[in-house]
Amino acid sequence: MVGLLKGIAASDGIAFAKAYRLLEPDLTVEKRTESDTAAEVKRFRAALKKSETELEVIKEKARRDLGDDKAAIFEAHLLVLNDPELTGPIEEKIKSDSVNVEFALEETANMFIGMFEAMENEYMKERAADIKDVTKRILAALLGVELPAPALIAEEVVVVAEDLTPSMTAQLNREFVKGFTTDIGGRTSHSAIMARSLEIPAVVGTKNATSDIQNGDLIIIDGLQGEVHINPTEEVASEYKKRSEAYQQQRLEWAKLVNEQTVTADGHHVELAANIGTHEDLKGVKANGGEGIGLYRTEFLYMGRDSLPTEEEQFTAYKAVLEGMEGKPVVVRTLDIGGDKELPYLNLPHEMNPFLGFRAIRLCLEEQDIFRTQLRALLRASVHGNLKIMFPMIATVNEFREAKAVLLEERAKLESEGTAVSENIELGIMVEIPSTAVIADLFAKEVDFFSIGTNDLIQYTMAADRMNERVSYLYQPYNPSILRLVKMVIEAAHKEGKWAGMCGEMAGDELAIPLLLGLGLDEFSMSATSILKARAQLKHLSKSDMEALAAEAITLSTAEEVVERVQASTQKII
Ligand SMILES: C=C(OP(=O)(O)O)C(=O)O
Ligand SMILES: [Mg+2]
């Protein structure tokens, strides 16, 4: 079909390629009585063989493209697949109960998964996750359906999915994946954030991408306007060729600012930092002239694997970032798992409201082994650069005090062991829960800095799930309520001589930047790919004019009025 889908512009740029549907197939199993059990056992063995061949291919590809540690997952899957302790009981069940192989497989696997998950042993919990994955693969082979294998994509495509989990996004090969579009999700869902750091144009929340787009359709992703064209006409395609060239031209202009400081028209300096997920993102930070790292989301170190990273692995990653930034500030956020960032191997119980649940600092204060390992790795790495540590999802002053006490204990232990730790590590918090913004004046007496996490602050203030496109109209960074909270936080910091940054996506938003400058924000941390555009914009803004604009904006009644006011007094960037 020829068509146009409208969604949320999630990552700048324009992409042209064939569609690749990345969908989880239906693996529902029915119970059947089978008299020819020998035939069922034969089907089972054939499915095992097919799965083994697939896993070997994926493992090799992962080893080549992603490294040995990522390939280790598939090695573990192969071990499970060939484990007679699993396959034996399945064949037994087929014969003794005269049932179909799919049913015997699912029942037996569920029994083992339940047993391993109940054990208080990390290793066994990981095995449960492996069995789940392997069972899916064998079932797909039995039911004759394909499992998506994003790591195996080897031609230029636009990925079409219902949603992309952050771990699936991490597997996308940038060489071939030219863009993506999803049915659900918002601009601040983590797959959208990762698309920006991978510089892959993306449109999310189109509602109908998977129903309207077939494999092989020619797709244009317009990540600037939030449009997806399906099998476009010649005219539309040639119009987009022009727009894409103009956009590339614009980027070349911005690139000239790569080594410049960020100074406003009236001579005020602000810091433009980058948000990163792994040390591999540093290339992008350098190429885009980042003045520091304002948010290192360490949870990605814990993803795409089936066990926790060791202290040594973490130390190596943190050291690489600190050294790579050559003394520029690096704000590392401690583990913020939960919400849409899941870690299957922790086997946390399913929650009704994961964004309001057991996540981030709440989990770290409870599962202190995980937290202490990370803090030790950070403290050891601190001597290799300019480290600042930040705790996520702080809701109360006591949580901050408790987390700080754990950090100080680990510091004391390391020092008594003779390990060097930097004397100048600033300690700050994310302000992403309204309770914390409201008493920012009290927090400011105890922390060294704030970084405002508007992705969550907006969802919690407006009670609008950041992932849900049906309530995305409530996701309003320019709402005066949000602007007032931001103002309170910045003023509270300044009153105590502390600095305030922002690492939510709002910090890189063209319409928000004038207001944030006017509200006095010191550091703007954003996807690296937004930095040069923001620098170009800030060069033309005067801080004193923006102060007047912000003072007026917080008195307006609606987000729409604020947007109108900003548009009337500033120039559009693209
Ligand atoms: C930066 C933030 O954290 P994350 O997007 O990782 O939740 C935020 O909430 O604004
Ligand atoms: Mg957050």
Image (cartoon, rainbow, N blue to C red):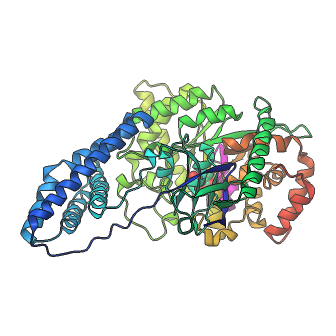
Between 398 and 330, the one nearer to me in the picture = 330
- Seen as rendered, the residue at the extreme left is 96
Magenta span has 403?
Answer: no
**Left or right placement of residue 360 versus residue 343 in this view:** right
Is residue 310 visible from the viewing direction of this image? Answer: no
The outermost residue toward the front is 234
The answer to whether one can see residue 377 in this image is yes
Residue 320 at what x, y percent from top left? 53, 29
Would residue 442 be counted in the magenta stretch?
Answer: yes
Residue found at x 69% / y 50%: 12
Q: Residue at x 30, y 50 (%)?
A: 126
Q: Where does the magenta region start and end? A: 437-454
Q: From the top left corner, tell me how far across and down residue 82 is, in percent.
A: 19, 47
Q: Nearer the viewer, residue 358 or 255?
A: 255
Q: Is 545 or 367 nearer to us in this picture?
A: 545
- Residue at 76% x, 66% y is 479
Locate the N terminus and report the quarter of the image it occupies.
bottom right
Q: Nearer the viewer, residue 425 or 53?
A: 53
Q: Position of residue 405 (x, y in %)?
A: 49, 45
